[in-house]
Amino acid sequence: AELYVAKVLDQNGRGMEANVLAGIEWAINQGCQVISVSIERGVDSCSTGYSTAYEAAGLRAIQQNALVIAAAGNRSRRSAGIQRRVSAPANTPSIVGVGAIRESGHVADFSNRTFCKYGEVDFVAPGVDVFSSDITRDQYRTRNGTSMATPHVAGIAALLMEQDSGLGGYSLYSRLKELSLMSSELDPADYGHGLPRAPA
């Protein structure tokens, strides 16, 4: 895989959605086929709807045989009885939403869930105590978040495309579904299609 990096936020992790959209568009124009977006903006209610601009970007990616994979958001506090909707841009129909699970397989306390018909958790991946890069002097630290889970799914998507160069867009999404571990005891609102597995 070749890695392309688009910086769309400032050093404080803040920025404008126009920059995020420009980053996605740039990645599509570079020929990137898996676009991982560990960014989230909260959604107040289902009546708020989803961004037509993000949907257009997600559809354009699919038309170019690519797939945008985004963090479902960290605004829930399940231990306190608070569960939030999938954040933008993951709440967009054509963008894949990723929730976070613990090492035990249980959904993370902070992970958002499906409430709206168009804002879904599609998959879950490890998102608690994930060793990750950091901008501090040590360069690495352990982090929590659906932003940590999202690259796991993007990485598996890249491995699948390495195995089958014909995959992309909808067919890549379908393959991720086929390889996902999901139990009937688990709520799809939290787990989506489950935990994708890397190819053998």
Image (spheres, grey):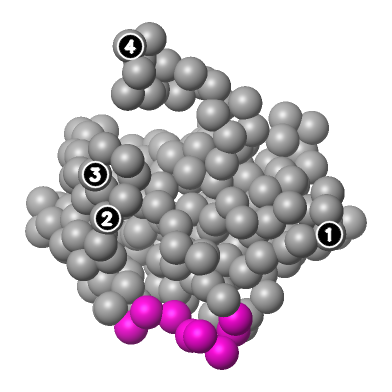
> What amino acid is labelled 2 in the image?
Gly
- The answer for how far apart the CA atoms under marks 2 and 1 are is 30 Å
> Image point 24% across, 44% down: which residue?
10
- The answer for how far apart the CA atoms under marks 3 and 4 are is 18 Å
> Would residue 124 be found to the left or right of residue 185 on screen?
left
The residue that mark 2 highlights is: 15
Element marked by disc 2:
loop
- The answer for how far apart the CA atoms under marks 1 and 3 are is 33 Å
The residue that mark 4 highlights is: 137
Mark sitting earlier along the chain (3/2):
3
Contact, mark 3 vs mark 2 (Cβ under 8 Å): yes
Q: Give residue 169's position: percent from left, percent from top.
A: 35, 63
Mark 3 nearby-residue class (10 Å; few <14, some 14–19, many ≥20):
few
Mark sitting earlier along the chain (4/1):
1
> Would residue 111 be found to the left or right of residue 150 on screen?
right
Residue 48 falls inside the magenta stretch: yes
Mark sitting earlier along the chain (4/2):
2
Depth check: give the residue in front, 77 or 145. 77
- The answer for how far apart the CA atoms under marks 4 and 1 are is 37 Å
- The answer for how far apart the CA atoms under marks 4 and 2 are is 23 Å
Identify the mark at residue 118; answer none if there is no mark: none
The residue that mark 1 highlights is: 81
Which image quadrant is residue 158 in?
top left
> What amino acid is labelled 1 in the image?
Gly
Which image quadrant is residue 160 in?
top left
Q: Which residues are magenta?
A: 45-52
Of all residues, the one furthest to the front in this rendering is 12
